[in-house]
Image: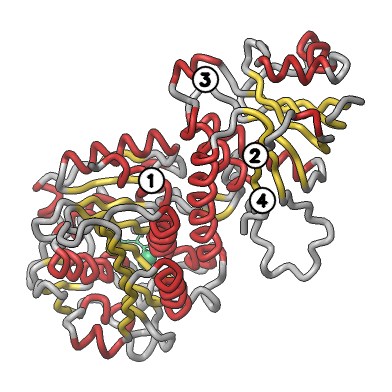
Amino acid sequence: MAFLNDVSIQSGKWDSESHELLVLGVFEDKKLTDFQTSVDESSGGVIARALDSDDFDGKSNNTLALYSEGPSRRILLTGLGKRKEFSLDKLRQAGGTASSSAAGMKAKIFSAEVPGREDLDVSGPAASGAFVEGLILGSYKFLDYKSDREDETVVEKVTLVNGAVRSGVEKGQSIAEAVCLSRDLAAHPSNVATPTRLAKEAQKIADEFGMKCTVWGRSEFTKMGMGAFASVAKGTDEPPKFILLEYNGGPKNQRPVAFVGKGITFDTGGISIKPSKSMDEMKFDMCGAAAVLGVMRAIGKLDLKKNVVMAIAATENMPGGHATKPGDIVKAYNGKTIEILNTDAEGRLVLADALAYVSETYNPRYMVNFATLTGAVVVALGHNASGIMGNNERLISRLKEAGEATGERVWEFPLWDVYCEDVKSKIADVKNIGAPMQSGSIAGGAFLKEFVGDTPWAHVDIAGTAWWDKTRPYIPGGPSGVGVRLSLELLNLMR
Ligand code: BES
Ligand code: MN
Ligand code: ZN
């Protein structure tokens, strides 16, 4: 969870109170803001002396701690990088560095100035929002299963002493909380974050924000014709769930936007079983579902004036006496027959029914799905960008813009006809794998495309970005909560 839950804006002069730790962002040019100059004056010139030395270079996320007898006992300088390269994401990183450094300095409470650069539009509510997102996301730790937390310092409260805009701060808080919900759901192991638990989380969001939640169990979605989803769920005794959330914040007759998530709460591969090495990581195979739940939570909290629906197909993918076998043929919700040549390509099967159901039932303005779909996307892009593809240029280009704005970068793969040929089956309409050892991520997208009808649609393959062990300024190692901020920015851009 995010431990930083108390973000306040100091109303009086900053030095009317004493501060345990004050965080100040400084560019590589080492020019101080007026506020920083006044802090320096009341702190015996420690900042100016530090900047005169070579101990601090202002490079992004470099820090230097100073000790003073002024109103703040400790001052932490954090580097903002080159002034002309400053951006909302650099600001978010500065926030993350501030709170993780504060925790490292055992400060539960700290203060900070909101950095900014007006000529680059890194100012006002947007800047406050990005900084607060960084602060909260950087305070995230997953300690739910630790009995002894004595050695863990967590930051709990921050006071913004200069540059904060309240509307931006509140928005940043709402968004960061939703990202942390998504991280938490991902971090819980598969014996806790079951399909039943995901359904409960959806119901909780519905209750809190007046949405409509519908949950179907195995017999219901099987009867409805979701043969692809049902075929994946056949091997498990853990009850699978089809989860829908409907939010009506917009005009009554306006078509909704749709978000769809892959909710495989554990992926063994099924009968096409995976090797045991790192198989534990397959508890993260529900990160698409976690992302879209986070999106809905944020939408509710922000009281967005749009209609939005969310669908999740949630199940374990297990081998067993009832499990689907390679070669089996099933029928999806849209009537297409699928030859299942590899039971480990299960994500596209559960999404096939979810996408077909949503596009037919809601006729969405546009539809975006999030899925940890292919190992191949990690080969192509590593952990620094999600793979995207789709059938609508405008949607794809807005997604790219949203990726730049949020730091949740995306990279497009082509869905040309020649690739779509690869998922045609000899004896059924389609097969669930493409050409061997070729363009594996595109094959996933090409398969999904068969189930979206005419709906403008994009597929975001987050297999590389949903979790990583590397610690980054506002993403500690582990699940990232990717997709939440990207989707919110997309909603903002797709007017
Ligand atoms: N959940 C996996 C994809 C995955 C693998 C995500 C590694 C993150 C890390 C997915 O269900 C899967 O197993 N995909 C197969 C598809 C193949 C059988 C066509 C893959 O990528 O190997
Ligand atoms: Mn799989
Ligand atoms: Zn999977």
Residue with the most extreme right position: 69
Asked if the residue at tag 3 contacts the one at tag 4, i.e. Cβ–Cβ closer than 8 Å, the answer is no
Q: Where residue 94 sits: x, y (%)?
A: 61, 32
Q: Amino acid at mark 1?
A: Leu
Pointer 2 local density, CA inside 10 Å: few below 14, some 14–19, many at least 20: some
Q: CA distance from mark 4 to mark 2?
A: 10 Å
Q: Is residue 312 visible?
A: yes
User: What is the x, y in percent for residue 453?
Assistant: 10, 60
Residue 155 - label: none
Q: Amino acid at mark 4?
A: Asp
Q: Amino acid at mark 3?
A: Arg
Find disc 1 in the rendering and name its residue: 486
> For the residues marked 4 and 3, what is the alpha-carbon distance in whole angstroms?
25 Å
Q: CA distance from mark 1 to mark 3?
A: 23 Å
> Looking at the image, is mark 1 or mark 4 earlier in the sequence?
4
Q: Amino acid at mark 2?
A: Ile
Q: Which residue is mark 2?
A: 9
Q: Nearer the viewer, residue 15 or 346?
A: 15
Quadrant of image for the N terminus: bottom right
How is the protein colored in the picture?
A: secondary structure
